[in-house]
Image: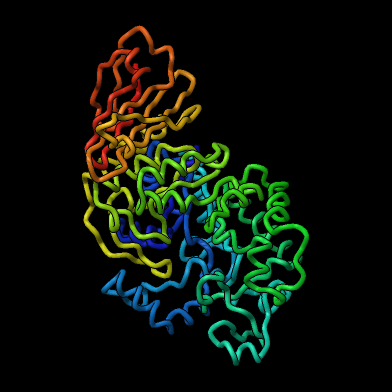
């Protein structure tokens, strides 16, 4: 099972430099810092934001009052030196020299590999910086406009190199003023995308593809219409991914995806897609909603990325009370599919710095939360082995709180685990029939991997009517029977 740890690279390297009293790049990160990253239960590191950032994009961002306000909200003592430009306004897919350039990245990858970790990097398929070389060398790869477009919609178009280009956009939001839209229908762009991804694959073990659904034929056609030209018979990703995998067969493809397009993108070649629906359910909906989500086809679930935060979402500790945070973390950590953790999540950080910044505020460590994650991450690695099954929880006519309990099992070769989560703000009781018939006829001791607490139970009772569970609000068990 893939477990990804996302690091805001520029911020992380800057803090390492301050900690060690010298400039640190990816090429000379102290070994103990890599050891901290390579905790048991993590197998993949996403170094977010390593590519060369755009001075032209930065200049545009500095004129945006809304962006500047968001920078100051996250970092009240903001200085000009803290604003590096957007990690997703890429001028070129070359590692920024401030991070050590390509040689620095190669050393970082080697250090991760020596600790048994894979490396994934960003790919931004939808747009490029306004000073990207393609605006002058390959305008056919971008969505172009006219002087009339620029005059009539100055917030949606820009002029560069004597041509007018469309700003990059998501169809549901205003255009992004600091980037230029690529044309997913252009055969030249598709060939260039393959070349870019192959080059990334030379430097990493996987790619996280930003806003991947924007490149799908039907989405792109609805967004850009005639400006994009004729719609190709083949969709973007089925055209691109197989050609990349011809060079890098094991390259991991992870899609940032929304709008219930996860299954379609899995069918188009992605290994994993963001599970934003689970995120929304855990933060805003009931156990019944989450349970319904978990009844989806298992092949689909294995292709999802479960998360509680990332650089686009608020910090979990900022939006979830501590008990609910821990219950949700147990859920995402022990489900099939990939898991995504965000650097700072384990320590309880509450400020999410915009991806333009190279510094974040100092925050105290939540020692209780960190101790919880120190137990959860290796426990989840042990749990997620073998076959997963969503379990039925039963109750009594005069007590329907069992509806708030979520339960599933993992059965591996010589391993068995049971996870039960009270996904509610009130105590819940229920019975969970266990799926292992050979428990019959003898007593068993169940050990909670999160607390070390043990429970002695009769095997026949564990099968029917089931393990009796009485959990306080937002509490969970991660049990293994012996």
**Which residue does the image show at 59% across and 75% down from the upper left?**
180
Q: Position of residue 227 (x, y in %)?
A: 70, 77
Establish if 430 lies above or below 252. Answer: above
- Please indicate whether residue 404 sits to the left or right of residue 384 in the image: left
Q: In the figure, residue 67 lies in which quadrant?
A: bottom left
State how many labels appear: 0
Residue farthest toward the front in the current orientation of the protein: 397
Q: Nearer the viewer, residue 178 or 79?
A: 178
Please tell me in which quadrant of the rendered image residue 379 appears.
top left
User: In front: 282, or 89?
Assistant: 282
Q: Choose between 480 and 250: the one closer to the eye.
A: 480
Q: Is residue 170 above or below residue 371?
A: below
Residue at image position (45%, 32%) is 390
Q: Say left or right for 369 vs 377.
A: left
On screen, 121 above or below 443? below
Of the 4 image quadrants, the one containing the C terminus is top left
Residue 103 locus on image (x, y percent): 54, 56
Give the camera-side residue of 28 and 328. 328
Residue at 53 percent of width and 58 percent of height: 259
Residue 94, quarter of picture: bottom right
Q: In this rendering, does residue 114 appear at all? A: no
Give coordinates of residue 26: x percent, y percent: 46, 55
| Image x and y of residue 464, in percent | 36, 18
Residue found 28% across the figure and 31% down from its top: 397
Mark yes or no: residue 99 visible.
yes
- Chosen colour scheme: rainbow
């Amino acid at each position: 099972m893939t477990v990804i740890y996302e690091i805001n690279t520029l911020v992380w390297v800057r803090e390492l430099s301050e900690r060690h009293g010298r400039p640190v790049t990816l090429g000379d990160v102290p070994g103990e810092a890599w050891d901290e990253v390579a905790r048991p239960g993590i197998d993949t590191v996403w170094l977010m934001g390593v590519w060369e950032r755009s001075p032209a994009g930065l200049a545009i961002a500095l004129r945006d009052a809304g962006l500047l306000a968001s920078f100051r909200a996250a970092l009240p003592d903001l200085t000009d030196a803290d604003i590096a430009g957007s990690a997703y306004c890429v001028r070129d897919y070359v590692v920024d020299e401030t991070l050590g350039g390509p040689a620095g990245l190669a050393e970082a990858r080697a250090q991760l590999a020596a600790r048994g970790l894979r490396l994934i990097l960003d790919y931004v398929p939808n747009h490029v910086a306004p000073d990207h070389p393609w605006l002058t060398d390959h305008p056919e790869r971008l969505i172009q406009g006219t002087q009339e477009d620029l005059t009539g919609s100055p917030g949606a178009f820009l002029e560069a190199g004597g041509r007018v280009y469309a700003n990059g956009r998501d169809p549901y939001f205003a255009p992004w003023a600091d980037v230029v839209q690529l044309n997913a229908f252009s055969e030249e762009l598709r060939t260039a995308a393959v070349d870019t991804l192959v080059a990334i694959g030379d430097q990493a073990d996987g790619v996280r593809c930003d806003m991947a659904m924007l490149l799908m034929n039907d989405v792109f056609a609805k967004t850009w219409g005639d400006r994009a030209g004729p719609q190709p018979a083949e969709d973007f990703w089925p055209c691109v991914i197989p050609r990349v995998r011809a060079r890098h067969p094991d390259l991991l493809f992870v899609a940032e995806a929304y709008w219930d397009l996860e299954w379609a993108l899995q069918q188009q070649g992605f290994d994993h897609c963001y599970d934003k629906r689970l995120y929304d359910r855990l933060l805003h909906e009931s156990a019944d909603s989450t349970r319904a989500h978990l009844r989806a086809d298992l092949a689909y679930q294995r292709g999802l990325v479960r998360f509680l935060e990332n650089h686009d979402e608020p910090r979990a500790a900022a939006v979830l009370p501590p008990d609910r945070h821990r219950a949700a973390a147990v859920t995402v950590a022990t489900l099939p599919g990939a898991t995504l953790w965000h650097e700072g999540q384990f320590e309880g950080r509450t400020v999410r710095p915009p991806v333009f910044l190279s510094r974040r505020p100092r925050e105290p460590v939540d020692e209780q939360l960190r101790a919880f994650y120190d137990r959860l991450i290796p426990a989840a690695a042990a749990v997620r082995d073998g076959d997963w099954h969503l379990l039925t929880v039963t109750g009594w006519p005069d007590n329907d709180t069992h509806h708030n309990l979520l339960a599933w099992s993992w059965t591996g070769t010589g391993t068995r685990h049971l996870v039960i989560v009270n996904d509610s703000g009130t105590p819940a009781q229920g019975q969970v029939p266990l799926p292992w018939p050979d428990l019959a006829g003898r007593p068993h001791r169940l050990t909670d991997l999160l607390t070390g607490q043990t429970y002695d139970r009769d095997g026949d009772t564990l099968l029917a009517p089931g393990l009796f569970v009485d959990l306080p609000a937002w509490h969970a068990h991660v049990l293994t029977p012996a």
